[in-house]
């Protein structure tokens, strides 16, 4: 069979569309990154993100606003919650990874209705998309330790479920 007569290869599968909650976390992470870089107001960052992309209306705006403004309001306690679980000083962590850590830590601490494995998985995916090559491993380790402390019962139940299959 010649190359000209070879049937076309099947098209690559289309990537799964992002959920509204994933988009909200992505925008919140971008907003926290911008806040860490510029120290601009949350309102200005909110407005900028809304106006800068046609995809913003597809995000869960309630989750986005809760996380963006919650992280900004609780930055001190979130930093204190994260520090003991990082193997290096937080001021040595990339700003992208810090933005992801703040978003996920806020959800782990303040949004118990969302299972912690979902939050950690979303943080890993954000870090893979926007962070350094191995940043997702660092983020996973820090958040796993935080979840074990903050959500001890949920963490123990998930561990038992993994052990028992």
Image (cartoon, grey):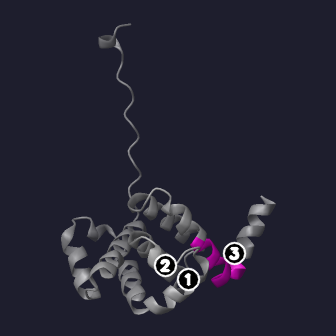
Q: Is residue 4 magenta?
A: no
Residue where numbered disc 3 is placed:
155
Between discs 3 and 1, the one toward the N terminus: 1
Label 2, secondary structure: give it.
helix
* Percent position of residue 30, x then y: 33, 72
Q: Residues within 10 Å of mark 2 (few under 14, many from 20)?
A: some
> Who is closer to the viewer here, 21 or 99?
99
Q: Residues within 10 Å of mark 3 (few under 14, many from 20)?
A: some
**What segment carries the magenta color?**
142-154
Give the Cα separation between the discs numbered 1 and 2: 7 Å
Give the Cα separation between the discs numbered 3 and 1: 20 Å
Q: Residue furthest right?
A: 164
Q: Residue at x 34, y 70 (%)?
A: 59
- Please say whether residue 141 is visible from this viewpoint: yes
For residue 90, which numbered disc appears in the image?
2
Picture quadrant where residue 159 is located: bottom right
């Amino acid at each position: 069979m010649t190359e000209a007569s070879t049937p076309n290869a099947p098209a690559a599968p289309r990537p799964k569309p992002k959920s509204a909650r994933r988009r909200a976390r992505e925008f919140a992470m971008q907003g926290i990154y911008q806040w860490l870089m510029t120290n601009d107001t949350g309102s200005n960052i909110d407005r900028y993100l809304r106006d800068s992309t046609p995809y913003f209306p597809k995000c869960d705006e309630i989750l986005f606003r809760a996380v963006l403004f919650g992280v900004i309001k609780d930055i001190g306690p979130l930093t204190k919650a994260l520090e003991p679980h990082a193997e290096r000083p937080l001021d040595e962590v990339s700003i992208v990874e810090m933005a992801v850590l703040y978003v996920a830590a806020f959800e782990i601490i303040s949004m118990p209705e969302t299972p912690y494995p979902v939050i950690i998985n979303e943080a890993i995916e954000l870090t893979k998309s926007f962070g350094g090559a191995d940043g997702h491993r660092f983020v996973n380790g820090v958040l796993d330790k935080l979840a074990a402390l903050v959500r001890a019962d949920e963490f123990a139940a998930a561990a038992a479920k993994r052990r028992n299959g």
